Image (cartoon, coloured by chain):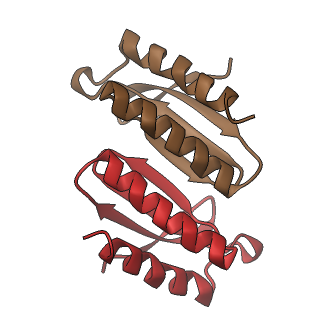
Chain colours: A red, B brown
Amino acid sequence: PDWHIVERDGIPRLERVFTVKDFATALALANKVGVIAEEEGHHPALLTEWGKLTVTWWTHKIRGLHRNDFIMAAKTDKAYASLK
Amino acid sequence: PDWHIVERDGIPRLERVFTVKDFATALALANKVGVIAEEEGHHPALLTEWGKLTVTWWTHKIRGLHRNDFIMAAKTDKAYASLK
């Protein structure tokens, strides 16, 4: 279960921590996810740290999870796979 | 006081939230801070969201704040200023 649902500020969110080799790679993945976000007009929270990127999706308008968030999660996984 | 000290996991950290116009600008600022981080070999946590970037500096080795973190904060401010 790479993605898990976390509730924060009363809003359920879909979150996954991607482990990568260093800070630059985490930021590179953040940029790939940023491209997807702009394409779809749907934006996550991206926490870039040394060796990991935490990606969080949710739908602001409904203060929760929409089918689209799960699609974005799948696209995020593809971006991660393309790093290697 | 743009930067404030927050304690998280028992570690004091220097944090600032930069307000920007959209997600792409937040990510652009994250990339600028990433360049500074690589130059100095010292890496922050960067939380990119729509319209804001939260930058957090601390020194892992000492589990706290070092003079260098304040220097990095000043460099981060310059990167932000250069956005406009």
Q: Nearer the viewer, residue A49 or B11?
A: A49
For residue B46, above or below residue A83: above
A59 sits left or right of B70 in the view: right
Residue found 55% across the figure and 27% down from its top = B76
Look at the image and tell me whether residue B43 can be seen: no
For residue B61, above or below residue B48: above
Residue found 50% across the figure and 35% down from its top = B33
Residue found 77% across the figure and 49% down from its top = B21
Residue sitting farthest toward the top: B67
Q: How many marks?
A: 0
Q: Position of residue A12 (x, y in %)?
A: 57, 72
Q: Position of residue B48 (x, y in %)?
A: 57, 51
Figure quadrant of residue B13: top left
Look at the image and tell me whether residue B74 can be seen: yes
Which quadrant would the C terminus of chain A be assigned to in this image? Answer: bottom left
Figure quadrant of residue A63: bottom right
Q: Position of residue A18 (x, y in %)?
A: 32, 64
Residue found 42% across the figure and 19% down from its top = B69
Which quadrant would the N terminus of chain A be assigned to in this image? Answer: bottom left
A59 sits left or right of A27 in the view: right
Q: Position of residue A66 (x, y in %)?
A: 63, 85
Figure quadrant of residue B57: top left
For residue A3, above or below residue A66: above
